[in-house]
């Protein structure tokens, strides 16, 4: 008798098939659950670590009168409800208002907790709070999706989470790794734009043009340059859109040049430089909208220079490769000015990004 | 993972002497800020400025 007709061998084949037909999804759910559980454990560790780092920073640098743990924990659960977008008319102003209100509230809250805090430390605590609160939120959402799928014994429900998890973990790891740089006030990869413009501003008269944003007027090859960046070395991105609006209101601007860090694609070299058109600025989109609106209304072309990097490189201590590109980027800015403008024209140069550890 | 190596980021500060244009790389110390006055140049009598602060990854 051959193996194929042996009833015992047939059972050996048929039994697993029956098991997989009826319990396949549950088996897949079990296998996937293991991976997701590990990721959730890691996220929990990040959440715990970021909170501890924040509390340690506050205790070490701000000398609080009482234990700040409870107040910080209360703050971490604060949420932001985005405006309704069924009628998109005016949505950008509403989003800007909501986001800025939250920022103002956070700043005032920290100031009320530590009345003698200086601007630089305040910006660091604010950034650390945002990181901790984001890591807490990521952990909560991933855990919720996992537990819901498990409770419903619903494998398809876990699929989107399984697909997105590597990207979520990449962001969470980057945020966790960024904490030491923010605590010590080191420049980040995202700070390359402010670093380039900050060096161009050295030794010049600077003034505050909008909230946490500085500007300088200089002359270059018979052209007028308005240099704009967030006010360093605090951890802030400033408000370059408001700054541009003020400059354009009182001057005739012929070109805008934006320098920013941008996410590289897989396979692209880190710290490579690319030139292009359009507003190079990240974030929630309100600043980009405002800059594009001003440029369109006044028919000003926007040129950009981007320095490519990964998510982790952008929010952790600047790498050597990125720092080495600063002089190259600066010479490309001057080249761009000469190529696209003529004598007597005015150009706004904006260094976009977090200016932590980068003064001017 | 069993085979993944632990990564440590080492922070460095690069000083540049505006007089002799020479660079000096040292470990980052808290309080170092870009473009600020750092120390006396070891090659001439100039005062160095912090030119760069960056991190290098060391795999253990």
Image (spheres, grey):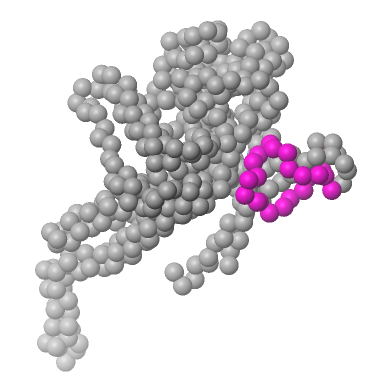
User: Is residue A308 at least partly visible in the picture?
Assistant: no
Residue at x-position 62% and y-position 21%: A206
Residue furthest toward the bottom?
Answer: A1
Residue at (63%, 45%) from the top-left corner? Answer: B31
Vertical side of A133 occupied by A222: above or below? above
| Residue A109 can be seen in this image | yes
The answer to whether residue B40 is magenta is: yes
Q: In this view, does B17 lie to the left or right of A160?
A: right
The residue lying furthest to the front in this view is: A65
Q: Where is residue A261 in the image (x, y as percent from the top left)?
A: 53, 36
Nearest the camera: B46 or A295?
B46
Q: Position of residue A66 (x, y in %)?
A: 39, 50
Query: Which quarter of the image is occupied by the C terminus of chain A?
Result: top right
Quarter-wise, where is residue A215 in the image?
Answer: top right
Residue B44 vertical placement versus B5 (above, below): above
Horizontal side of residue A262 vs A324, given as left or right? left
- Left or right: A217, with A143 as reference point: right
Q: Where is residue A326 in the image (x, y as percent from the top left)?
A: 65, 36
Magenta stretch, residue numbers: B21-42
Relative to B14, A242 lies left or right = left
Tell me residue A342's x, y (percent).
Answer: 66, 11
Q: Name the residue nearer the viewer: A46 or A269.
A: A46
Residue lying at 53% horizontally and 65% vertically, measured from the top left: B6
Q: Residue at x 62, y 56 (%)?
A: B10
Hey, which residue is sitting farthest right in the picture?
B44
Question: Split into 4 quadrants, where in the image is the N terminus of chain A?
Answer: bottom left
Magenta run includes residue A163: no
Most foreground residue, A280 or A129: A129
């Amino acid at each position: 008798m051959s193996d194929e007709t042996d009833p015992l061998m047939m059972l050996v084949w048929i039994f697993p098939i029956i098991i997989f037909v009826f319990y396949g999804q549950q088996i897949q759910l079990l296998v996937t659950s293991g991976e997701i559980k590990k990721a959730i454990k890691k996220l929990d560790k990040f959440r715990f670590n970021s909170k501890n780092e924040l509390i340690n920073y506050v205790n070490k640098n701000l000398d609080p009168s009482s234990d700040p743990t409870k107040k910080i924990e209360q703050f971490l659960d604060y949420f932001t409800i985005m405006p309704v977008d069924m009628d998109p008319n005016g949505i950008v102003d509403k989003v800007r208002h909501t986001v800025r209100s939250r920022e103002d509230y956070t700043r005032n809250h920290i100031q009320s907790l530590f009345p003698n805090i200086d601007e630089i430390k305040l910006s660091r605590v604010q950034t650390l709070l945002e990181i901790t609160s984001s890591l807490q939120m990521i952990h909560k959402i991933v855990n919720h999706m996992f537990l819901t799928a498990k409770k419903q014994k619903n494998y398809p429900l876990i699929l989107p989470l399984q697909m997105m998890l590597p990207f979520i973990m990449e962001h969470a790891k980057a945020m966790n790794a960024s904490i030491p740089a923010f605590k010590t006030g080191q420049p980040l990869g995202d700070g390359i734009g402010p670093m380039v413009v900050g060096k161009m501003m050295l030794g010049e008269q600077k003034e505050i043009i909008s909230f946490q944003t500085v500007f300088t007027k200089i002359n270059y090859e018979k052209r007028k340059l308005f240099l704009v960046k967030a006010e360093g070395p605090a951890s802030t991105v400033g408000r370059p859109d408001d700054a541009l609006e003020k400059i354009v209101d009182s001057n005739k601007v012929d070109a805008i040049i934006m320098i920013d860090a941008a996410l590289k694609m897989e396979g692209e070299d880190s710290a490579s430089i690319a030139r292009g058109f359009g507003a190079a600025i990240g974030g929630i989109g309100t600043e980009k909208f405002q800059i594009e609106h001003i440029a369109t209304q006044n028919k000003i072309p926007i040129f950009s220079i981007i320095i490519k990097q990964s998510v982790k490189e952008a929010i952790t201590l600047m790498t050597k490769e990125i720092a080495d590109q600063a002089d190259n980027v600066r010479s490309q800015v001057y080249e761009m000015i000469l190529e696209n403008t003529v004598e007597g024209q005015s150009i706004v140069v904006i260094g976009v990004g977090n200016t932590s550890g980068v003064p001017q | 993972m069993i085979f993944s190596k632990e990564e440590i980021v080492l922070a460095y500060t690069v000083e540049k002497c505006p007089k002799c244009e020479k660079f000096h790389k040292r470990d980052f110390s808290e309080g170092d800020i870009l473009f600020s006055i750092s120390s006396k140049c070891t090659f001439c009598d100039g005062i160095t400025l912090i030119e760069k602060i960056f991190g290098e990854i060391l795999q253990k």
